[in-house]
Image: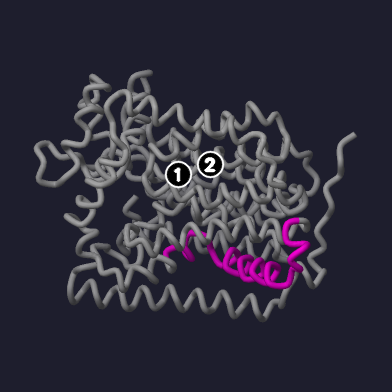
Amino acid sequence: MKRTPPRTDLRDPAVRPGGAAADAYAVAAAGLLVLAAALVGTYLQNRYGTLRVGWPPLVGGWMPHAGPGTPAALAVAVAVVAYGPSLTVRLPWRPLLLAVWGGALAWTWSLALVDGWQRGVAGRLTTRHEYLQVIDRFQDVPETLRDFHAHILIGAPDNWPAHVAGHPPGATLTFVLLDRIGLGGGAWAGAFVVTAGTTAAVAVLVTVRRLAGEDLARRAAPFLVLAPAAVWTGTSADGWFAAVAAWALALLALAVTGHRPAWTGLGAGLLFGVTVYLSYGLTLVAVIAAAVLLLGARRLRPLPYVAAGFLVVPAVFTALGFDWWEAYRLLVTRYHQGAGGVRPYGYWVWANLACTVLVVGPATVAGLRRGGGVLLGAARAALLRGPAPRLALLAGSALLALLIADLSGMSKAETERIWLPFALWLLPACSFLPGPRGWLAGQAALALLLNHLVLTGW
């Protein structure tokens, strides 16, 4: 007999700290942060040219436009706002997961096509900085991996484009593999990123349900569909990275809560291994993984399987001649040789957070405020027992990972795409909000305005 998860009463003061006024203050403060980042950033860029972005704090340019995706994006937004909250209550769990993925696909594809097929999808990963520029250099994969380090620095012969040099070779090998199976070119690469990247919403829901209960997962569902983050999920390989990391965490959550712990633990480990060979910065997913372990009632039995799975990927890459640590050391030098060495830390250390506000939207800001109140108001003994504190702790771990990345100085600008794997885990905090339709409308409006007014760089 299945256990019915406890429902979370948003009228409970322990779950609903403060009220609408406090939410409004939080959103207004976030809005002022974005405004300050725009005004100060524009001044710094115009005067000194050191920010290296076209429309501070985002990479892009002011260009009001519409495209073939505009009617579809408006239709998806209206449909999710009108019917999303009620469908999340009525649908059985598995059909709900399919509906969330379908909704996220429709929303992300529509936003991407606002810029047209070539600019929005087919040409995104073919520019001079991107992975598809070097596919022909991976004819002999083992040889290329052995020689990968020699092309990271700017002064090196045939140095890699910025995104290839800035990531472990697993990122580029994704598109090499697509090419090998007959799905070469920008159109297939773009379609793959959108299709795979949108599954992250399902992974987040699976995790929230296992760790904080089905009620809160259902409340979060429409916000994971209608996320402003979709503006960048559909236009950069970081959407794919976010999905891999999200499924690693979802499988870990299944393992530590007793669902086939050997197989899910092994799968989690394998995906964690893939994750750190897609992006160096995704080692910080370990912060969220630690929260998952804590919330999983500290069941350590699956950990040997997780460790065994994790070791497979580093072992393979190392055997083929790629040294992760040496490549990262060279990347740090390359980072400071390029825009990273020019962009001022004193601006980006707070302007990055303004980028995050635009990625997660006003509803997430208000939800995080309420989540913080839940954590502060929860008794220590109940911190890991109640659904609301457990969800707040999960979202808080993602926020902590994001802040560590920010303070590191290795994330100066471009965080609207780089931080997608962390930002997605902030969105479930929206489940703390009453009156979801108004908040969903705000999320959709922000995404539509960004996509139609700014020609993003990714």
The answer to which image quadrant residue 444 occupies is bottom right
Q: Label 2: few (<14), some or many (≥20) within 10 Å?
A: many
**Image check: 150 left or right of 182?**
left
Compare residues 117 and 259 and report the one nearer the observer.
259
Q: Which residue is mark 2?
A: 198
Q: Tag 1's secondary structure? A: helix
Q: How far is mark 1 from mark 2, CA to CA?
A: 8 Å
The tally of labels here is: 2
**Image check: 376 left or right of 75?**
right
How far from the left and from the top, in percent, is residue 452?
A: 42, 58
Which numbered tag is attached to residue 239? 1
Which numbered tag is attached to residue 251? none
Q: Tag 2's secondary structure? A: loop
Q: Residue at x 73, y 72 (%)?
A: 377
How far from the left and from the top, in percent, is residue 124?
A: 33, 42
Whether label 1 touches label 2, CB < 8 Å:
yes
Compare residues 315 and 24 and report the one nearer the observer.
315
Q: Earlier in the sequence, mark 1 or mark 2?
A: 2
Q: Residue at x 55, y 51 (%)?
A: 288
Q: Is residue 63 visible?
A: no
Magenta residues, dominant SS class? helix
Compare residues 125 and 140 and report the one nearer the observer.
140
Up the image or down, 39 lies above or below 188; here it is below
Give the magenta part as a residue range. Answer: 355-384
- Image quarter where the N terminus lies is top right
Q: Label 1: few (<14), some or many (≥20) within 10 Å?
A: many
**Image check: 430 left or right of 6?**
left
